[in-house]
Image (cartoon, rainbow, N blue to C red):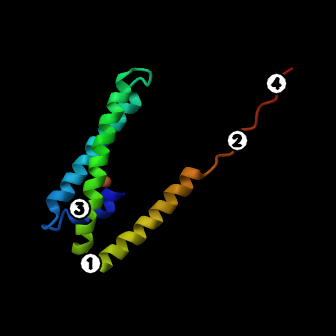
């Protein structure tokens, strides 16, 4: 969502293009690391090493976005752009949360055949 709603807009703003592209590349790296963590055996001692590397990169990414990119974006984007993105974001968030929390009907257990 962040890439679709925010970074794609920032890529076209020359004042912040490099930072937004860097943020997108960090998303790419974090996604690769997550896929690796998901596939890697959890009982292998290297799993925690991989997780710590993921955590360090995630911390770096969040700090850069929260301390630099987002405040700069707030100064560059117009109020209308911010409001439009915020409305779409809240709508998507609500829809994704409801579908994630949606309960599926439990399949009725078949009666054992006699
Ligand atoms: Fe991000």
Evaluate if marks 1 and 3 touch, with contact meaning CB atoms under 8 Å apart: no
Few, some or many C-alpha atoms within 10 Å of disc 1 (few <14, some 14-19, many ≥20)?
few
Mark-to-mark CA distance, 3 and 2: 47 Å
Label 3 or label 4, whichever comes before in sequence order? 3
Which residue bears the numbered disc 3? Answer: 68
Label 4 or label 1, whichever comes before in sequence order? 1
Q: Quadrant of ligand 1?
A: bottom left
Please determine whether, in this image, residue 11 is positioned above or below residue 101.
below
Which residue bears the numbered disc 1? Answer: 78
Mark-to-mark CA distance, 4 and 1: 65 Å
Please determine whether, in this image, residue 62 is positioned above or below residue 84.
above
Camera-nearest residue between 7 and 48: 48
Q: Quadrant of the N terminus?
A: bottom left
Q: Residue at x 19, y 52 (%)?
A: 22
Mark 4, mark 1: which one is toward the viewer?
1
Q: Which element is circle 1 on?
A: loop
Q: Which mark is residue 112?
A: 4
Please determine whether, in this image, residue 35 is positioned above or below residue 78.
above
Which residue bears the numbered disc 2? Answer: 106
């Amino acid at each position: 969502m962040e890439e679709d709603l925010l970074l794609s807009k920032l890529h076209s703003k020359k004042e912040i293009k490099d930072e937004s592209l860097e943020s997108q590349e960090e998303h790419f790296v974090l996604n690769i690391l997550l896929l690796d963590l998901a596939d890697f055996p959890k009982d292998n001692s290297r799993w925690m090493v991989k997780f710590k590397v993921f955590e360090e990169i995630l911390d770096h990414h969040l700090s850069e976005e929260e301390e630099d990119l987002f405040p700069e974006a707030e100064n560059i984007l117009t109020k209308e752009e911010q409001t439009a993105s915020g409305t779409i974001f809240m709508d998507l968030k609500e829809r994704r949360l409801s579908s994630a929390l949606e309960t599926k009907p439990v399949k009725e257990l078949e009666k054992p055949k006699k």
